[in-house]
Image: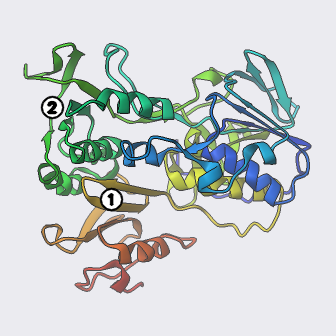
Amino acid sequence: MSTPTPSATSPHAPPVDVLVVGAGLAAAQTVAALRSHGFAGDVRVLGAEDVPPYDRPPLSKHLLDRTEPAWLTDELGLDLHGLADDVRLGVAARGLRVEPGRPGAAVLTDEGEHRASCVVLATGSHAVGVPAWPSALTLHTAADADRLRTALDGGPRRLVVVGAGWIGAEVAGVAAAAGHHVTVVEARDAPLATGLGGRIGALTVPWYAAAGVDLRTRAQVTDVGDAGVRLLDGTVLPADVVLVAVGARPATAWLADALPLHGGAVPVDESYRVLAPAGPLDGLLAVGDVALRRSARYGWVPGGHWDEALRGPDLLVRRLLATDDDGSELTPYVFSTQLGHDLTLFGLPAADDAPVVLGDPADGGWSVLWSRGTDGPVTAALTVDRPRDVGAARRLLAGPDLPHVRLDGETTLAALPRR
């Protein structure tokens, strides 16, 4: 998709009723925002999982020390049943019907059709699995976490994690700290290469050995079976448990061909309105992992950023109801605790952006700035074990435009002068 041209949100009448499809963080926050901004109409929720909304990051970060989900009622004080008029959990969406000239849509389920003048798609994402490896586990839902904990129960296990991304690194560190024998297999040259690039991802390699984890990079898995994990070079890694952690995809299969998708995601504009070739669809929005958001700063922002699910719904609702919209835009934000280190990433580094490392990774905390070319704006900032730099990174990327900074030998984000 081409880089968008910013467009203003046109005024419109508020909806009569709202149907939120999904019952995760983005969905629950949408319902909360509707009520906090004064929407008094009918609000209904359909959720595929048969449990109340919960937060997903603790599933990996606290896999073994938190056996109950982080319920949003406890985490955010968010009572979905108290805010919505009708909440139906365990009811998965099976299809969507959009009628030309009629706002909103009809959502098809096993129990019948649900129609509203405004439908918000917030069905999230699902873990990528490999059908040919039925014994391998994935980690995305509370039920997935329960299965993985059970598999690791009963003493030291041989765990092989396929994928050294955010989830794979987090689980590897947690499992190794609990005494399990952990091997991580990564097809690319370095961990976190997809999100941070190979050069910066390579700086995390020493963390694995220090945490007691055997890391194998440039290693292709060809089979997972009773004998363990077989690599392309013929090596067989014995395994009691195998976790496939190779990413997540938007949960949009149920939409079939009802909407135009890009890479499986639902393209939306700055106001989270679903985009069709002729423009936004009336009364149809998407937010969270399921959405691909149009951005004046970054072009297109994919889902999967926790802040999009946490704060995106408030922007959606303010623009939907035309209330106190300040024209702000969310900055992509990822945080991770892995292998004894804390990472925060603000912004969205592109593959050809140039990274500059601040500080010495061998001596402790460090940070990274990515910019477009040698004199271009900063597109992203990463902090590693530098709590004081987190706030500076957030402020740096919070403005309406991407910032320019002058590197004058400073090694901390907080000390960098702006220009």
Look at label 1 and name its amino acid. Asp
Q: Could you say where residue 46 lies in the image, as x and y percent from the top left?
A: 73, 31
Q: Earlier in the sequence, mark 2 or mark 1?
A: 2
What residue is rendered at 29% in x and 31% in y? 152
Asked if residue 31 shows in the view, the reply is yes
Residue 331 sits above or below residue 59 on the image: below
What residue is rendered at 88% in x and 31% in y? 102
Position of residue 266 in the picture relative to residue 377 (left or right): right
Q: Which mark is residue 353?
A: 1
Position of residue 282 in the picture relative to residue 233 (left or right): right
Indicate the quadrant where residue 224 lies: top left
SS for callout 1: loop
Q: Which residue is mark 2?
A: 219
Which sits in the foreground, 253 or 390?
A: 390
Q: Quadrant of the C terminus?
A: bottom left
What residue is rendered at 13% in x and 47% in y? 212
Which sits in the foreground, 295 or 78?
A: 78
Q: Could you say where residue 20 lies in the image, as x and y percent from the top left?
A: 74, 38
Q: Mark 2 against mark 1, which lies toward the viewer? A: 2
Label 1: how many Cα within 10 Å (few below 14, some 14–19, many 20+): many
Position of residue 413 in the picture relative to residue 203 (left or right): right
Which sits in the foreground, 376 or 45?
A: 45
Indicate the quadrant where residue 411 lies: bottom left
* Residue positioned most to the left: 234
Residue 272 sits above or below residue 361 on the image: above
SS for callout 2: loop
* Residue positioned most to the front: 154
Look at label 2 and name its amino acid. Ala
Q: Could you say where residue 263 lies in the image, as x and y percent from the top left?
A: 49, 33
Position of residue 105 in the picture relative to residue 274 (left or right): right
